[in-house]
Image (tube, rainbow, N blue to C red):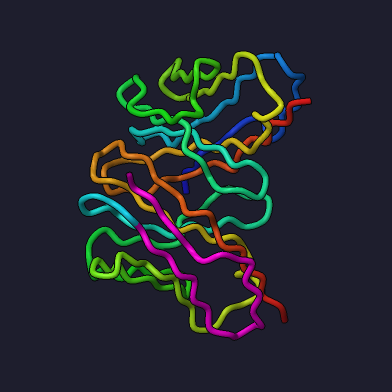
């Protein structure tokens, strides 16, 4: 069964550094999302992406965050200048259509020191 | 705005006990409703879904019925197993095609032999 893949599984970075989290959604899916989950807490929506543009973003997704689908297969989340509070598990998700469920990757654990 | 509330955990049950995890929602229109499960160290997996009132979603012995009159989508299983130990998230998605999925806070379930 096709799946959403995320790399790396764990990323450690220093405060102020840029990080890029990578995702390969399922190939025939049209809608793409990033979520994050701070350890032991709820799953929070960051951004949705459709037709090569952001369709919605949350308050968390400020100017330090950006997303890109550079080549029709990858979907990346960039944090320009990481803060300690960005430490979390970041999940990429995709879906095929309107009533389709989201398919999640296994996440990237980001640790900012 | 749309939101999901679910019972606080953690929940600890003996093997073969009956499970209920309550979930209620607030939404405009007719959202789709989901239960997702997160096993330790993994991403979120769709457990079951229902897209309209009175629909019953079911999978792996779990069931939930979309009750519009009580705005509820309670998860049930007649006989839990140790392998069901995980965090369960109730979620909803709005009616627009790109609508994000909004998650409840999650309920941790531990099943002991």
Viewer-nearest residue: B88 or A103 = B88
Residue B35 magenta: no
Q: Would you say A2 lies left or right of B56 here?
A: right
Residue numbers of the magenta segment: B1-25
Write the residue at 56% across / 19% down. Answer: A78
Q: Position of residue B99 (x, y in %)?
A: 31, 39
Position in image of residue B41 (x %, y %): 68, 50
Which quarter of the rendering shows the C terminus of chain A? top right
Q: Give the image quarter of residue A30.
A: top left
User: Residue at the location (58% across, 34% down)?
Assistant: A6
User: Residue A102, relative to residue B65: is it above or below?
Assistant: above
Rendered position, A49 above or below B87: above
Residue at 24%, 49% (x, y): give it: B28
Residue B97, image x, y percentages: 26, 39
Q: Is residue B89 above or below residue A9?
A: below
Observer-nearest of B48 and B64: B64
* Left or right of residue B84, residue A3 in this image: left
B11 in magenta: yes
Residue B58, given in percent of the width and then of the height, sits at 38, 70
- The residue positioned 44% from the left and 60% from the top of the image is B35
B23 vs A15, left or right, is left
How many numbered callouts?
Answer: 0
Q: Nearer the viewer, residue B86 or A1?
A: B86
């Amino acid at each position: 069964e096709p799946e959403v893949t995320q790399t790396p599984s764990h990323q450690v970075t220093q405060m102020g550094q840029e990080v890029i989290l990578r995702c390969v959604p399922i190939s025939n899916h049209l809608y793409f999302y990033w979520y994050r989950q701070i350890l032991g807490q709820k799953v929070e929506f960051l951004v949705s992406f459709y037709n090569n543009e952001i369709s919605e973003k949350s308050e968390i997704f400020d100017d330090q965050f950006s997303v890109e689908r550079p080549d029709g297969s990858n979907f990346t989340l960039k944090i320009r200048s990481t803060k300690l509070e960005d430490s979390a598990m970041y999940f990429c998700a995709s879906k095929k259509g309107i009533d389709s469920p989201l398919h999640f990757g296994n996440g990237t654990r980001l640790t900012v020191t | 705005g749309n939101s999901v509330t679910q019972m606080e955990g953690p929940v600890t049950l003996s093997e073969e006990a009956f499970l209920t995890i309550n979930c209620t929602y607030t939404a405009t229109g007719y959202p789709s409703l989901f239960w997702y499960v997160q096993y330790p160290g993994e991403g979120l997996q769709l457990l079951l879904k229902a897209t309209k009132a009175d629909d019953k979603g079911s999978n792996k012995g779990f069931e939930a019925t979309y009750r519009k009159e009580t705005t509820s989508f309670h998860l049930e299983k007649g006989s839990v197993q140790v392998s069901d130990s995980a965090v369960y998230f109730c979620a909803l998605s709005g009616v627009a095609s790109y609508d994000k999925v909004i998650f409840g806070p999650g309920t941790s379930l531990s099943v002991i032999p």
